[in-house]
Amino acid sequence: MGLAEKLMYAGGVVSLVTGIVGFFESEDSIRDRLSQASEAMGGSMTPEMIDQQVALTPISALVTGLIAAVLWFLIGRFCGKGKGWARIVATVLAVLNLISFVFGLLGSSIIPGASGGTFVLLLNAVSAIIAAAVLFFLWKKESTAYFKSTR
């Protein structure tokens, strides 16, 4: 069980870094991405809408990163203690992470810049790889035996 728990802590660190990177992204970079995305969708965003989004994006990225990090850390801790409900929650969150990553990739191929930039895309890929590894280790025979032994 130890490796899955450590991977969840690593996922928390990656989420925190992703949030911090998003928080410090320059306004010009955010504006360029949003303008590209708007153009790709037929110019559906007005300049005022883009300005609003530019103002909200950094804090939104930081809050999302913090929430994701806390979830990774808490679920990792409870899985480490052998709590069966935590394994189920970890499984659901890992699957959602993987689905989100795939849709993020699809979105960035359809709408340029939708992923938040290359570095954020790389961090998201690392997070998805960690999520897949967590799923693998959480459901190994040894892990199932560990969870059963702590009931």
Image (cartoon, rainbow, N blue to C red):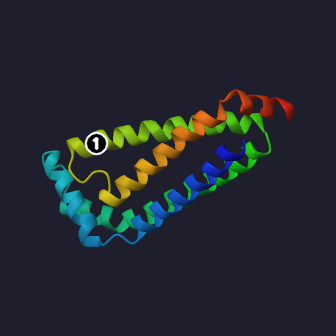
Residue at coordinates 66% horizontally, 54% vertically from top-left?
73
* Residue 80 makes an appearance in the image: yes
Left or right: 138 in relation to 20: right
Q: Secondary structure at mark 1?
A: helix
Q: Nearer the viewer, residue 4 or 89?
A: 4
Which amino acid type is shown beneath numbered disc 1? Gly
Q: Nearer the viewer, residue 121 or 129?
A: 129
Residue lying furthest top: 141
For the N terminus, give its image quadrant. Answer: top right
The number of numbered discs placed on residues in the rendered structure image is 1
Identify residue for label 1: 107
- Residue at 29% of width from left, 39% of height from top? 106
Task: Tell me: 74 left or right of 110.
Answer: right
Quadrant assignment, res 101 = top left
Q: Quadrant of residue 117?
A: bottom left
Q: Is residue 95 above or below residue 119?
A: above
**Quarter of image, res 31:** bottom left
Q: Is residue 17 above or below residue 74?
A: below
Pinpoint residue 55: horizontal percent, then vertical percent.
35, 68
Residue at point 20%, 50% (across, down): 112
Q: Above or below — where is 58 with respect to 6? A: below
Where residue 107 appears, as percent x and y from the top left, is 28, 42
Q: Quick check: 44 left or right of 140?
A: left
**Residue shown at 24%/58% (left/top)?**
34
- Tell me the quarter of the image containing the C terminus: top right
Residue 151 in view (yes/no)? no
Give the left or right position of residue 15, taking residue 140 as reference: left
From the top left corner, tell me how far across and down residue 84 is, in percent.
76, 34
Q: Is residue 8 above or below residue 93?
A: below
Nearest the viewer among 60 and 95 is 95
